[in-house]
């Protein structure tokens, strides 16, 4: 088969041609599938696989687009993505570069709401134990909301109608759109630092997107961390935000929050009258009880005839004193008898007598010990005499005393048993029956038959 150089493509040329065809013929599409192998690089780009029961495709979402995703993508989540179908030329793999991503079956904001709610709930930000009580009579009320919205007008209207002598401090903040969450956090922290008695954070109703700043994690944490009691008044009665769960109290509307903060004048006056009536009744009952006790005390026998009571107590005291004296005399007699018996026993067990008997007994034991020791020593000496005789007969010293000697070769201290062990000029150590001497070998003679010759 003949080929022409013009018909041969390089791998790069083929890949670019396929990439051009894909981008031109298919371009950007919406694709649904399940996320698999989700991973985010250190640079902030997300790489994953989008798959269904039949096939799969590689996908990438760069950091700029990923930051606009309202929920947290992860492996196993069903999503719908919009992106450009293209080819990654380095590996020749076709992939989709995602520009948008939405969860399948649930809105992105609703999914983000549920995930953040579970996360913060697990951290304990919604626990009842952390809720602070709302003060009954606050003097300084802080409000974080829009200065032009209906919420601040409703709050001021209710406060003015119910009670006129409260100080309202408004922190103007955006409550919708970009930057609203940071304004709300700043307002909460500023009013908390100023030391207001209670704080209202809220706005009027709206869609989930409109209320979303009150679902932002920084806002929820700021509400949780505030030392001042916080009332969340976001939206209408059907609207719930994560700020409601973290606040010390949730009010369905801003007007309801103002009604909770300050009590109505007539209700307070009625409460004061009720407490005054209860106090008067309690004082009357206490006075009546004291009068009754005083009347009973006046009619008692003690107050009518006090001298007779004193005489009876005095007679009883005399009886007790006589009984005590009698008991003390009896106890003294008992102790005296016990002391006499103890003295007699002590005389019988005199330490002097016991020491004397012990000395006599010790002398007898010493004499017996001396006698037994002498007999035992003589017995062992008689047994040792024959052994000493045999040991003396076998002693090398006894042999040497009969005219023999022992020689050692120096410096090895080797025992000399034969003359062949020595050479002329060797030093030897000779031991006699009494004493020893060091000598030098002058001559070596061989052993001759017939005994020893000198």
Image (tube, rainbow, N blue to C red):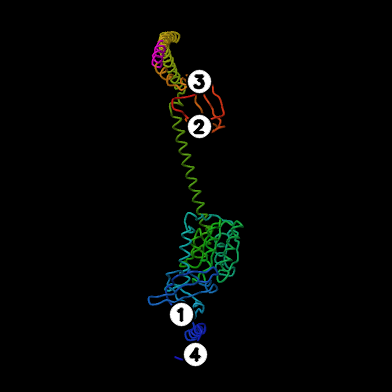
Q: Which residue is mark 4?
A: 7
Residue numbers of the magenta segment: 371-385
Label 1 Cα crowd, 10 Å radius (few <14 / some 14-19 / many 20+): few
Q: Does dot 2 land on a helix, a strand or a loop? A: strand
Q: Main secondary structure of the magenta part?
A: helix
Query: Do the numbered discs 2 and 3 sit on residues whose CB atoms are within 8 Å?
Result: no
Q: Which residue is mark 2?
A: 414
Q: Is residue 292 magenta?
A: no
- CA–CA distance between discs 2 and 3? 19 Å
Label 3 Cα crowd, 10 Å radius (few <14 / some 14-19 / many 20+): some
- CA–CA distance between discs 2 and 4? 107 Å
Mark 3 or mark 1: which comes first in sequence?
Answer: 1
* Mark 1 vs mark 4: in front: 4
Q: Nearer the viewer, residue 96 or 138?
A: 96
Q: Does dot 3 land on a helix, a strand or a loop? A: loop
Height in image: 350 above or below 131?
Answer: above
Q: Return the x and y of residue 451 as percentages of the image width and height.
A: 44, 25
Q: Which residue is mark 3?
A: 433
Q: Return the x and y of residue 250 as percentages of the image width and height.
A: 49, 61
Query: Do the numbered discs 3 and 4 sit on residues whose CB atoms are within 8 Å?
Result: no
């Amino acid at each position: 088969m003949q080929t022409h150089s013009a018909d041969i493509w390089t791998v790069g040329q083929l890949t670019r041609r396929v990439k051009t065809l894909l981008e031109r013929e298919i371009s950007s599409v919406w694709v649904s599938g399940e996320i698999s192998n989700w991973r985010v690089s250190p640079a902030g780009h997300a790489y994953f696989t989008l798959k269904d029961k039949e096939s799969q495709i590689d996908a990438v979402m760069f950091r700029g687009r990923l930051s606009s995703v309202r929920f947290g993508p992860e492996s196993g989540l069903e999503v719908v993505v919009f992106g450009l179908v293209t080819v990654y030329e380095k590996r020749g793999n076709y992939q989709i570069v995602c520009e948008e991503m939405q969860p399948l079956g649930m809105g992105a904001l609703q999914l983000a709401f549920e995930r953040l709610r579970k996360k913060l709930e697990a951290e304990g930000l919604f626990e009842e134990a952390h809720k602070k009580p709302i003060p009954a009579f606050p003097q300084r009320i802080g409000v974080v909301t829009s200065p032009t919205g209906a919420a601040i007008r409703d709050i001021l209207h209710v406060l003015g109608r119910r009670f006129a002598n409260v100080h309202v401090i408004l922190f103007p903040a955006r409550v919708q759109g970009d930057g609203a969450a940071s304004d709300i956090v700043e307002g909460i922290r500023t009013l908390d630092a100023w030391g207001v008695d209670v704080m209202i954070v809220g706005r009027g109703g709206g869609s989930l997107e409109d209320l979303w700043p009150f679902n932002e994690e920084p806002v929820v944490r700021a509400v949780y961390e505030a030392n001042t009691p916080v009332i969340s008044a976001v939206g209408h009665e059907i609207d719930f935000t994560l700020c409601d769960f973290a606040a010390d109290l949730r009010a369905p509307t801003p007007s309801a929050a103002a009604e909770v903060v300050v009590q109505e004048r007539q209700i307070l006056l009625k409460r004061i009258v009720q407490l005054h009536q209860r106090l008067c009744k309690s004082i009357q009952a206490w006075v009546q009880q004291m009068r009754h006790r005083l009347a009973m005390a006046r009619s008692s026998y003690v107050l009518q005839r006090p001298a007779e009571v004193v005489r009876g107590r005095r007679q009883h005291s005399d009886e007790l004193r006589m009984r005590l004296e009698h008991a003390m005399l009896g106890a003294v007699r008992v102790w005296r008898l016990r002391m006499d018996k103890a003295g007699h026993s002590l005389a019988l067990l005199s330490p002097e007598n016991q020491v004397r008997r012990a000395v006599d007994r010790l002398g007898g034991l010493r004499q017996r010990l001396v006698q037994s020791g002498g007999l035992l020593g003589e017995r062992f000496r008689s047994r040792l005499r024959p052994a000493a005789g045999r040991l003396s007969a076998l002693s090398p010293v006894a042999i040497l005393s009969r005219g023999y000697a022992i020689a050692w070769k120096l410096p090895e201290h080797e025992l000399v048993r034969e003359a062949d062990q020595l050479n002329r000029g060797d030093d030897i150590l000779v031991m006699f029956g009494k004493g020893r001497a060091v000598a030098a070998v002058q001559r070596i003679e061989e052993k001759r038959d017939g005994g020893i010759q000198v």
